[in-house]
Structures are given as structure tokens and as C-alpha cells.
Amino acid sequence: MSGPRRLAVLGAGPRGVSVVERLIANHAETGGGSVEVHLVDPAPAGGGRIWRHDQPAHLLMNTLCADATHWTDDTVQCKGPVVPGPTLFEWCRLLTTGEVSWDDPVVAEEASRVVPYSHPSRRLLGAYLRWCHLSDLSGLPEGMTVVGHEAAAVDCVRGEDGRRLVTLSDGAWVIADAVVVATGHADTVPTDGEAVRVERAAETGAWYGRPANPIDQDLTGLAAGQPVIMRGLGMNFFDYVSLLTVGRGGRFVEQEHGLVYQPSGEEPRMIVGSGRGTPYRAKGAFGRMTPHFPPKHLTTEVVDALEQRGDVDFMTDLWPLIVADTARVYHQVLHDQHPERLAQPLAEVLQTIDGHAHDVAALEELIKEFVVDPADRMDLHHWDRPLLERHFEAPAQFTDWWLADLRDDLGEARRGLASPRKCASVALGQGRAALRRLVRYGGIRGASYDRDVDRWYRGFAGSLASGPPAVRIAELIALTEAGLIAPIGPGMQVIDTDTGFEASSPQVDGSRVEAKALLEAHLPPAALDATADPLLARLRDSGQARAWTIPDHVESAFRTGAVEVGPPPYRVIDAQGREQDGLYGFGVPLEGLHFGTQLGPLARTNSRFLRDSDAIARAMLTG
């Protein structure tokens, strides 16, 4: 076959442009020659849709500035050449000193004041990723070209010659020798309940916002002063709150007793809640990069053994070790700050924890004996469900509790390394690193993944360890005090009415509130069977892709929403269970087969993201 080798990268967000960088880096090592890369995405290449560089600067990341990167470094164990480059923080310094340029005064102003442990704006990361991509393109090797297409891929068909015809939304097409699907977060088709709500809202003049990326949601239908029920108190919730307040011209002012919100008058009134009833907890303000607490129980050697053994049950094999490691950190920090609060010498406490590292129930009982005051004890059940079995006689009573809880969380966040709770939250969240290895290809049994990991630990660990910057909690306090945030209570229930929606909490008397607007403040999950992405739907319906089912010989297998792929370099599995040459999957569409795919590459961590990107690029170049 004559002519260049044509490669199609579908998706130009962080993963797509990383593959392009790795194609450039590996070009010479894999034989050089004529290579034509087609980068397909309607959003600007670099940040893509989620991290686009023109979004509002008040939307924040929960990753730290010095952690974010686009480049390989000497910790990345990949076959391709390491090509170092500046991290996001280093790029900000170069921008501030004039060694690089970026034509956006908002980005330049933020870059001048960030520190390594800042929580930057999404706009800043988008600008950085865009600059990195343009920098990549400025150094293309001889024989390589990159063609950008500002459109979406809507179909992909394999021809008799083995090449694939990729059809684009603008009617154009690309014939490619190899294709990688790196399309990121995808919307889903409405569930039956959502479809009914959409139809009813249209009939009654109500407003319904389905799960979506906040900056893609059209919020213009939410009028000033209008009550809107918001379901979900995770990371999307904080973005929506920012869009509906600062995004509408309001501002926060620092005063002696804390932040005060000065409204613009354009804000709706937000009636907020979730099952847990409390928002994601603030990240600790450690005054440095997030600490790492070396585990004593869930060690690399233990994870190696579990990975080799397989058939892992989360609650039996992992959770007890996570609890023990978390307890060690909690009591160590408590001792360092307030040794008088321990009822026993620290050495005895740690020895007791280590001796019961496989028995959560026994350890939880012993923890009660470690600490003099119950208020100082590590209580994971309370951290998970602080409102379990609580009852409030009036909404005002719950609001008082909500404010006191937020102030307590903010105070703990500001204590940083002196807070046993915030340090223990980091330790508990570190357990997800093991899942990134063990979930892959069914290492954890299907029923345990579904019940224990996906429906419980993911959210619990995320709420403690991957919450918002502390300033978001301070803002939430100010908005509640200003009357623009009204918390409903735990166990939030939403029903349809003739004119809109009604929200209530079974644990708060008199909490029933009616509104003509309902906003689902959370992202849709990766769901191949329900995807609204035309390309993924076409691959599924044509038998070129299938959803991954996690096996389980004890309980029930679990069908995930993930696109099934083989081992690295992640060739997509077809409906007959065969790996397909020349078709690769990468990132968020694989969530469920892989774990934590939304996480970007972190500097100096031997990033799996970058190792995977390199493996895919080398396979695309070599066939």
C-alpha cells in the first residue's frame, strides 16, 4: 500500500492530544516515514470540551497546580522516549516571566499568583493544554503532518482492506489505518423517567436539567429569584453554584467574620440536597502539596499478591486494610497535636490497630477505647452518613445544623496537617490507587465491584478525599446565610407535580418545597448501552464494540457501561469477543473495565495515563 500511514485520533481533549504528543515522540523510533494524523473534535484541541480554555475563570479544579502535566518525565516507565516539558505550575512561571506567551489577560493574571499547591481554574488548565498541543505541533518530525477537524466522529466502519472509514458530523470523512477512540465524557439517552420529565416540563412550562457537564447545560431558563431544586452535592454541584452566582455577576467579599456574598439580583434560589444530605468535604489546606502517607497494610506487595490471585472481594480483601491504614494516620496525627487525648500510649494504639487489620468490626470497637472524648474519635460511619437516624423538627433547625457542619468542615480544612480528620481522609482516599490496578479486567468480582466499589466506596472516598477547595465551603456558608442556598435534608426525595416538582426530606419536618425547575447536579456515568454519543452507539450497534461484564463465580456477574478492550494497547473487543486490529479505546469510555479514568496525568508519579498513551501511539504507528 502506497501513501502515508493515516491515523485518526477521535477526541482532542487531554487524552487525544497526549496520543498526538506520543505519536510525535515515537515517530523516529518506530520507523519514521510518512504519517498523517487526523485529530477530530468539535471543541478546541488541548482541553477539549471539558477543559476548554474559554470557559469561565471562576470554575476550579480540585487537582493541584504542580501536579497537572502533559509531558512524560523520568518516572514514566514507557517504551517510547521521554520528552519532558513544564508542568502547569512551571508553565505559569514561564508565562509570568515572559518566556512563553498566551493571549489571555485573565489567564496571565491567574498565572502570576498561583503557587504549587493552588487549585487553579479549569480555564488555566485548558490554556496550558492548548499551549502544550500547539508546542507539539511546532516541532513535528519530517514526514509527519497533523490535520485538525472541528467536527465529531459519528461513524467508523472497517473496509475489506482493513482500513477504517470515519465519518464526521460535517459530512467529511477520513480513511485511517488505525483509530483511537478518546472521546471522554459522553451524554446518555434519557431514561424512561427522564424522558417523562422532559416531556412534562415542556407541557407545563417547567424546566428540567438532565445530568450533563455544567458548562454545557443551558441555564438561561432559570430566572432571577426562581426556586430551583438541585439534586446532587458533589463536584458538579459546586460548578453549578458558581455558574448561578458569580457567573451571574455576584461576588464574594472577605470580611472580618468570613466571606459575605453580595448578590447581583440575577441569582435563582437554590434548594439543594442529596441522599447523604451533606456536600463533598473540603480538601485540606495543607500549605504544601497533598501529603502521602505510606501504607503499612495495603502495601504494593499486598496489591501485587491480590492482583496475581484475582477474585478479590472489596469488603473482605481491601476495606479492612484501608481502615487500618486510615486509623494509623488518624491516631498518629491526633497524638502529634493532642497527645493527652489518647487514652493509651501511641505505640500501644498502633500495635492494636496492626493486630486487627483484618477485622473491621473488632477494630471499630477498639477505637472507642483509644480516645478519651467521643468527639475526638475516628468514626467512619459518621463521616459517611453523618445524618443517619437524625431527625429535625423544622427546616430552620436543619439549616442551623447544615451551617454548623460546614463551619466545622471548613475549620478542619484550614487546620491542614494538624487535622486528624483531613489527614485520615487523604489516607482513606489513597485506597483508590489499589483499585486502579485491581479493577482492571475483573480483578475484583462483579458483585463486589457493583455493590461495594461503584455504589459505595467510590462516592464515600470521593466525598472525603476529592472534594472541592476549602474556599468552596466558605462560599457555601455565605450563600446559605444570604438565603440563596436552602438545604433540604438527607434522603432527598423529588416527585413530579402538575406544575413542576416537589422536593422533601423524610428526616426534616415541613421540608416539602415546590419549584418549577429541577436540575440534576451530577454527570452521567459511562454507559455504552445508553450512550448518546453517535460514534459509540454506532460501534455498539454494528458489533464493533461491546460492554464489559465483570465475571463473578460466587454472586452475579456485573455488566458495566465500559467499552471492553484488551490489554495494552487497548484494542477494542467486538461483539464476538475478538480484539480488533487498528481500533483502540482510551480513557473515560473504559470506566468500569478500568478505574479512575477521569484522572489526568500527574507529574512524577509514573502516570498510567502517559504509559497508556505511549503504548497506544506506538501500536498505531507500527500496525
Image: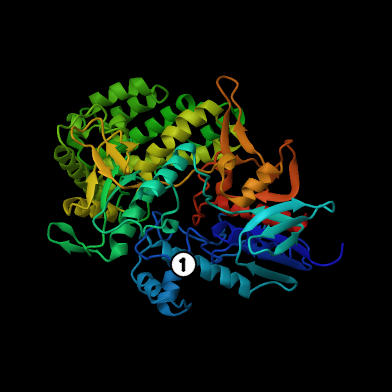
Amino acid type, label 1: His
Q: Nearer the viewer, residue 57 or 173?
A: 173
Tell me, yes or no, if residue 295 can be seen here.
no
**Whole-percent x and y of residue 247?**
32, 63
Residue receiving disc 1: 53
Residue 427 versus residue 235 in the image, above or below = above
Quadrant where the C terminus sits is: bottom right
Q: How is this picture coloured? A: rainbow
Q: Residue extending furthest bottom?
A: 98
Label 1 secondary element: loop
| Residue at the image position 37 percent from the left and 55 percent from the top | 289
Instruction: Using the rendered view, name the quadrant where residue 11 is placed.
Output: bottom right
Quadrant where the N terminus sits is: bottom right
| Residue at the image position 52 percent from the left and 45 percent from the top | 188
Left or right: 429 as drawn, with respect to 619: left
Left or right: 297 as drawn, with respect to 158: left
Residue 51 versus residue 401 in the image, above or below = below
| Residue at the image position 20 percent from the left and 50 percent from the top | 480
Left or right: 369 as drawn, with respect to 527: left
